[in-house]
């Protein structure tokens, strides 16, 4: 198959406009975000949620859908992104989500911040080092990392670091092993993993590892089960999950699992409910959620749930507020 992955409502091909995969973040199961209600007997309510922002469905979008993990209900925030945009990348700290770069007919470098406490959206003074789309992103406890992408002229391999403490952005000495866009990313507590993608010559299956303690990059022996781009990714505390995407055979539904303790890759028996690319993904402490995307005929609203305990997939009753692809995603509740 050629490198064209176009939404039915999109005139551009995915060789120039691709979704970088969601920012899947490992969840720290020892900490949850809670709200104490005023009553005679205080009650702690888990407010952890996934946020699906922007995207494309014939037009660029700026809305933010919220998936509350406790009851798996979907609502739409009053806050919106500062621009209608797609092909962004996203990561999160314990306090805020960050949506960076993307395309709205022009490549962008701005970083929007979603404050979880009041769900307000502002734009940082700092920007990415380049105007870029098709990046992938992950985060440690201290910083977010935005890697690869396309700047309108060529694919890139640089890695920008957003330090959460002062929200400053620098560029690492380390780079990805290839110039690439359309990767997906997740992270363990120790490292970020950037997988697959398209380099304008061929689809890729390699997995780069960014070790957080010294910010060095290596490439795993393990590879994805297929050469693929436009996947979505999330993770539990034990493993990362790379799902769907597009390759030479077209749209896919398989889910690859990267076990963090020995960095081996396997493929789950279970699949997504549809073959799609350009989905977005996030995770709670218990499950990963894969939402939207394009199935070859139209953009979608469905949300698939992968339960980490038994790695079974179900489809939620809740759906996104509109058919959409090329969104970016982060999550509150925990950082990893």
Image: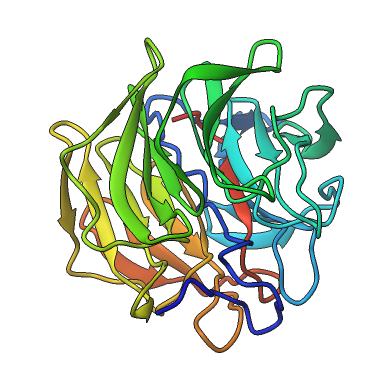
The residue lying at 23 percent from left, 45 percent from top is: 258
The residue lying at 33 percent from left, 80 percent from top is: 249
Image x and y of residue 75, in percent: 71, 60
- Vertical side of 312 occupied by 249: above or below: below
Residue farthest along the bottom direction in this orientation: 297
Q: Is residue 50 visible?
A: no
- Vertical side of 133 occupied by 260: above or below: above
The residue lying at 60 percent from left, 47 percent from top is: 154
Image x and y of residue 20, in percent: 53, 52
**From the viewer's perspective, is 215 left or right of 52?**
left
Image x and y of residue 238, in percent: 24, 37
Instruction: Depth check: give the residue in front, 243 or 45.
Output: 243
Q: Quadrant of residue 25?
A: top left
Q: Quadrant of residue 314?
A: bottom left
- Vertical side of 248 occupied by 262: above or below: above
Quadrant including the N terminus: bottom left
**From the viewer's perspective, is 201 left or right of 62?**
left
Image x and y of residue 30, in percent: 38, 25
């Amino acid at each position: 198959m050629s490198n064209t992955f176009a939404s039915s409502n999109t005139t551009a091909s995915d060789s120039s406009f691709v979704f970088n995969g969601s920012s899947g973040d490992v969840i720290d199961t020892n900490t949850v975000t809670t709200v104490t209600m005023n009553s005679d007997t205080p009650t702690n309510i888990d407010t952890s949620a996934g946020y699906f922002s922007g995207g494309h469905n014939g037009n660029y979008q700026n809305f933010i859908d919220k998936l509350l993990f406790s009851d798996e209900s979907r609502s739409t925030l009053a806050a919106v992104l500062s621009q209608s945009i797609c092909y962004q990348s996203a990561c999160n700290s314990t306090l805020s989500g960050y949506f960076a770069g993307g395309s709205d007919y022009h490549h962008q470098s701005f970083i929007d911040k979603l404050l979880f406490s009041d769900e307000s959206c502002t734009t940082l003074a700092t920007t990415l080092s380049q105007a870029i789309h098709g990046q992938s992103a992950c985060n440690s406890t201290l910083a977010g990392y935005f890697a690869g992408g396309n700047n309108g002229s060529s694919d890139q391999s640089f890695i920008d670091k957003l330090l959460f403490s002062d929200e400053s952005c620098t560029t690492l000495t380390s780079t990805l092993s290839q110039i690439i866009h359309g990767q997906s990313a997740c992270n363990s507590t120790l490292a970020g993993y950037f997988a697959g993608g398209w380099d304008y010559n061929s689809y890729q299956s390699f997995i780069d590892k960014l070790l957080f303690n010294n910010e060095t990059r290596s490439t795993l022996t393990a590879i994805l089960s297929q050469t693929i781009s436009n996947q979505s990714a999330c993770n539990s505390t034990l493993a990362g999950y790379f799902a769907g995407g597009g390759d030479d055979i077209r749209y896919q539904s398989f889910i690859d699992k990267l076990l963090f303790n020995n960095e081996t890759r396997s493929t789950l028996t279970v699949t997504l409910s549809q073959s799609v690319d350009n989905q977005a993904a996030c995770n709670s402490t218990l499950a990963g959620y894969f939402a939207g995307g394009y199935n070859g005929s139209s953009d979608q609203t469905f949300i698939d749930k992968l339960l980490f305990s038994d790695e079974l997939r179900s489809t939620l009753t809740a759906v996104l507020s509109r058919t959409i692809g090329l969104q970016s995603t982060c999550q509150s509740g925990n950082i990893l």
